[in-house]
Amino acid sequence: TRTPEFIAPISYCTNIPTLKGSLYHIVVATSLDKKEALNIIVHKMEVVVDKISELPEPLLQYILSFLPIKQVVQSSTLSKRWNHVCSTIPVLEFDKSFFESKLWCQDTKETCEIQRKRVELYHFVEQNLLSRCRQGLSIKKFTLAVYLSTPKSVSRVDRWIEYVVKSDIEELNLDFQTFKWKWKRYYPLPQNILLAKSITVLRLKACRLDSYFGDFSGLPKVKAIELKSNKGVEKVELEASNIYHLHIQQFGASKINLVPCKNLKLLKLGKLHVTDSCFNYHISQLPLIEYLSVYWCDKLESIKISSHRLETFHIMKCDKLVEVEINTPKLCKLSYVGGNTISFSVTALAYLSEATYQMLHSDAPWGVKKIQLLANLSNSKSLELLNISSTKDMVIPKELRDTLSSPSYKVKQLMIQILKSFTADEFIELVDNLLWISPRLELLLITHGEWFDKKWYRETISFKFSYEKPILRGENYSCCKFLPDPCWRHCLKSVTIENCRAPANVETVKADKEILEKYFYENAKILESFQFNPKCLYLKFHFDVPDKPPEFIASISNCTNIPTLKFSGLPKVKAIELKNNKGVETVELEASNIYHANIQQFEASKINLVPCKNLKLLKLGKLLITDSCFNYHISQLRFIEYLSVYWCDKLESIKISSHRLKTLHILKCNKLVEVKINTPKLCKLAYLGGNTISFSVTALAYLSKATYQMLHSNAPLNVKKIELLANLSNSKLLKLLNIKPAKDIVIPEELRDIVSSPSYKVKQLKVEISKSFTTHEFIELVDSLFWISPLLELLLIKYGKWIDEDKCYETISFKLLRILISSEIINLLHIFSLLRMFFNNQSIGYIINVANSLVDFSSPVKSPFLEGRILVVANSYQFLVGGIA
């Protein structure tokens, strides 16, 4: 009955002429760099009823139960009613998305903040569970996935579970193996869990289970149990007749007792050390079993199953298995992952619709046993062959084809997964062998992977076949002598091929078509139709509404055989992106309204940007353009503000003069030897490349940030490298990235004596080092960095180190206050440093007294300034030396 205030945020929208709504308030936030005027019309100002809040409380709680706990907590701030609904929701899932992994980072800079957040999360869970327990509220589902780091964390979990059990928990999920560390702390399962009469579902992972485990007589309502990676389990005895779902994955368990589980319908057994007799006997005692999965059971050698209800059966990676006998007339789905020499027999003729065979050793040679195995798995309409290394692994020798019948004659749909790509000849050989394996296919799917531009693409080629009744004129065909009916060669009427390739050139697609067409017309006697539909060209345009001026974006990627791209017929286009299109040699942008262009083309050697007078943002990557072409077209862009050039391997000299350019990135142009930049308004400059380049920058007034990432940081420091650093240092902030060991940035003394500090104007310096360092290397590093930038106000050194198989980054910060000091203070610091060296074991007071006497002795005139500040200088020096050590 209450109408809460409804807030609708609209953010980062552009060119929206009209917004209509029936809400009390509309808060509109546009992006900072695009301040288009919005015409907002608010109409229908009658009272609006929040229909969601009017729903019954149980229904609201049911909806919220599908949300992560963090979103549930956020919803509690909407109103008092929502707060009550969220605080009494019966589903609590404190999983790994709640205890975020970043909270466990080892970064020393954030240690205090990490501890504070960790305590807050624990306190929230504690108070929430305690409040429910005191109010007598029941909990339907409770999930806890947390890392146990200390004994204190174990006692904390004990309290939480006690609260949950008292709240009549129905579904309990405990997972203490969430985070990957070298060592684990198993949670000792308390006795009260196995006495909770309200539990219906119990899932335990990484718990320590004692000898009492297995007796579930104290859980009269339990229907599903899942045990994974628990410690101390050698024998599992399930005395619970109401269980219908059971999943046991235990490394050390060698005995199981499933006899009391007469109502069990779903069973998964993994990583057990059970024997053949134990396994076969207990499976035979499950009259209602419908789903069975067995995986990584290393002691199993023979599986014999007879069941009138089993519908789904999975056998995966039981390495010692040599025999499988299945008598299951209602079996629908069968999958086998394992070796090829196994004796396999299946009696499931009527219902089997899907079979999957994943070869662990697909490169093993084809023999009679392997074909018989395939035949026993092929009494289904659909067959999947997975994990085939290459096409040659599916080539069946001719002598076997001449003496054996096709193993998968009844299969109508065949899907094969090949891990590597193949040539056109290998492709034809593969198709020929697959059509021998299944000679009356209706659908054939061949999936294989291919690397393109450092990315992994998965291609699918589909064949659709249609047949007509063959006309046999007393002929005896050798290809069909073992088959009850003629094969595809004598009744194939039409073939439709869809070649869904990753980016490829038109020659490959054309070769595929020619060789396939020739193959089918030569081998199919009555073929009438052959269709080849390559799907390798993807053009996506988001067209605007007529008479409206929204932003138009054209994105073209992964296209083939387009020698020239012209954009003269798109009058409203404002942004164009071209990436990884094959065969593009020339790009001509004849569109004066473009303000954003991103061109990343391998083979493009010519571009035309002259018509793009209003271009503000330009990214050019992987082009083969020359210096003259690049420099000329950049000079024609009067309004350019952002320019990024990367992986343009033909560029040797870049010369840019622009009065508007604010950001420039030059990345990995390997042949580049000269860069000249005259950009008075440049704010950000980034360079990733070699050290021997000639670099000159005129950007004194506005440059605030420069980044230099060294490709070869281990190259010896010389005059040219320091000059390059000096040209990149006309900024307040300088970043030096990709330094591998700290010694790569140490400046030799002979260079310091003849060269000036390159980054004298830099106030903030950030250095990123890939490896950790010793204390001595650290002192050398700091000394060199202060020589590079002697007037620093902030120095940040970020370096990586390995902690428990995870790479963590630590940051050391130096904040410096620069003051004007007299020569006497400088002399005093020198004196004090010498004293610290000679009197290292003496107290600070003793050294101060010696320093005072030395100052009195060395100064003919008594200095009250020195007398008043000698103690401050001494303490400051002690602090600095202690901090560095």
Image (cartoon, rainbow, N blue to C red):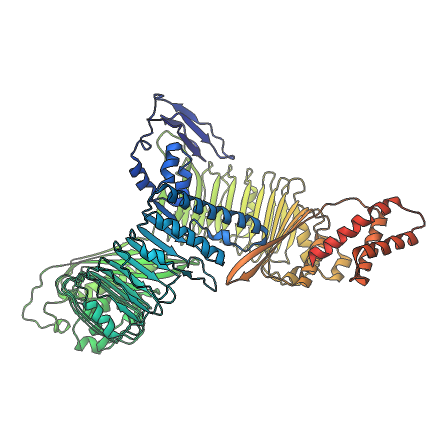
Q: Is residue 597 above or below residue 175?
A: above
- Image coordinates for residue 853, horizontal then vertical, percent: 89, 54
| Quarter holding residue 184 | bottom left
Looking at the picture, tell me which residue is in the foreground, 252 or 366. 252
Looking at the picture, tell me which residue is in the foreground, 301 or 33. 301
Specify the quadrant that holds the C terminus.
bottom right
Looking at the picture, tell me which residue is in the foreground, 34 or 836. 836
- Image coordinates for residue 451, horizontal then vertical, percent: 40, 60
Q: Is residue 659 above or below residue 586?
A: above
Taking the image as shown, residue 270 lies to the left or right of residue 604, namely: left
| Quarter holding residue 347 | bottom left
- Image coordinates for residue 499, horizontal then vertical, percent: 29, 56
Tag count in the figure?
0
Q: Farthest residue toward the right?
A: 860
Instruction: Specify whether residue 149 is in view.
Output: no
Taking the image as shown, residue 420 lies to the left or right of residue 329, namely: right
Looking at the picture, tell me which residue is in the foreground, 421 or 676. 421
Residue at 22% x, 77% y is 369
Taking the image as shown, residue 549 lies to the left or right of residue 288, namely: right
Q: Farthest residue toward the left?
A: 474
